[in-house]
């Protein structure tokens, strides 16, 4: 069975005999910030190039992901300038306090205050971080972040990091800054957002080399991305070899197609039920401490 509609997704994961979905790449944001993100996507390709499928209020979006089968709900946020990360972390802590099935998330920016607020967020219970190199415009290997990375490495808190050069390259995107970072902090638990598109193979190399580097599936192999930044020949075989390190991601709600299409795109890679079980549930559940 292929889950062509969102209504089909629960029966799909039930047929795999898993308890639900462990999606590591979901965005819940302060309303004003979320509407700015939507305005950015509304302007893609002169308007209409990136339609937001789930342009709903927060209660409706929570209801949607629960109906799909998410057993825990991340609230990934990311700052675009100094001074934002600490208050975003406060918002995330509030979200985790009022949403019983939330994953307590946090973020950071390359600024002198980062080690202190990262340590505080970890102490307060954050178990998933988000870093967006492209939007932030900073080098993840900037020495100002050494204390923050050290704290995250020691706590083994996973960091979903958008560092590939898609959809557009930034000053510090690509594999080189992440390799530089991992040379200093080789035990960091990094989850490479979008599998590092379009540098798919380069980031797969990092996941092969470093024990705690993972790839998330956000938009991977979907029709939308395949028309723009397709996976290279033989890449599905690499994903099979990296089975314990591939984690479900979706980018909900900011996706230009139904959530079910992400699951269908992974299914049609033809890597088998065992691979799908690990990707849809076991790997993400382990990273977010659901099991």
Image (cartoon, rainbow, N blue to C red):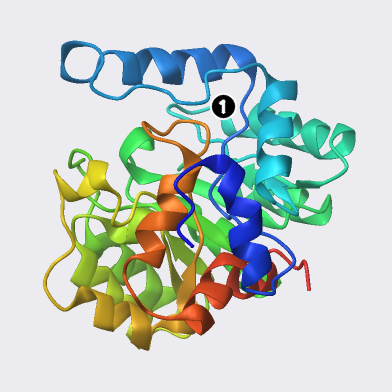
Label 1 SS: loop
In x, y percent, where is residue 155?
70, 70
Compare residues 247 and 40 and report the one nearer the observer. 247
The residue that appears at 50% across and 42% down in the rendered structure is: 5
Total label count? 1
Residue 277 position by quadrant:
bottom right
In x, y percent, where is residue 114?
58, 45
On the question of residue 142 being in view, the answer is no
Compare residues 272 and 183 and report the one nearer the observer. 272
Compare residues 244 and 268 and report the one nearer the observer. 268
In x, y percent, where is residue 276?
50, 73
Left or right for 90, reference 68 = right
Compare residues 241 and 227 and report the one nearer the observer. 227
In x, y percent, where is residue 53?
45, 26
User: Disc 1 marks which residue?
Assistant: 84
Left or right for 286, reference 23 = right
The residue that appears at 41% across and 56% down in the rendered structure is: 264
Left or right for 227, reference 193 = left
On the question of residue 133 being in view, the answer is yes
Q: Is residue 48 above or below residue 156?
A: above
The residue that appears at 25% across and 41% down in the rendered structure is: 224
Quadrant for the C terminus, please. Answer: bottom right
Q: Residue furthest front?
A: 1
Q: Is residue 81 above or below residue 99?
A: above
Residue 39 position by quadrant:
top left
The residue that appears at 16% across and 79% down in the rendered structure is: 234
Q: Residues within 10 Å of mark 1 (few under 14, many from 20)?
A: some
């Amino acid at each position: 069975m292929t889950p062509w509609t969102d209504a089909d997704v629960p029966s799909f994961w039930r047929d795999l005999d898993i308890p639900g979905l462990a999606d590591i790449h979901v965005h819940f944001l302060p309303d004003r910030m979320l509407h700015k993100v939507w305005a950015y996507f509304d302007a893609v390709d002169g308007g209409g190039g990136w339609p937001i499928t789930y342009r709903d209020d927060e209660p409706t979006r929570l209801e949607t992901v629960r109906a799909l089968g998410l057993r825990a709900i991340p609230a990934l946020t990311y700052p675009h300038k100094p001074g934002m990360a600490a208050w975003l972390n406060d918002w995330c802590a509030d979200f985790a306090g009022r949403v019983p099935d939330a994953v307590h998330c946090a973020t950071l920016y390359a600024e002198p205050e980062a080690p202190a607020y990262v340590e505080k967020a970890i102490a307060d219970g954050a178990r998933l971080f988000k870093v967006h190199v492209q939007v932030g415009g900073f080098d993840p290997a900037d020495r100002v972040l050494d204390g923050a990375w050290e704290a995250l490495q020691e706590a083994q808190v996973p960091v979903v990091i958008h560092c590939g050069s898609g959809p557009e390259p930034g000053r510090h995107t690509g594999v080189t800054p992440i390799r530089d970072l991992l040379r200093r902090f080789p035990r960091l638990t990094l989850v490479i957002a979008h599998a590092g598109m379009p540098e798919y193979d380069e980031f797969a190399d990092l996941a092969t080399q470093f024990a705690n580097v993972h790839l998330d599936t956000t938009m991977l192999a979907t029709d939308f991305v395949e028309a723009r930044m397709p996976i290279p020949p033989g890449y599905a075989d690499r994903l099979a070899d990296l089975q314990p390190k591939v984690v479900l991601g979706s980018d909900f709600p900011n996706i230009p197609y139904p959530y079910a299409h992400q699951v269908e795109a992974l299914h049609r890679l033809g890597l088998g039920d065992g691979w799908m079980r690990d990707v849809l549930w076991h790997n993400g559940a382990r990273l977010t401490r659901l099991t």
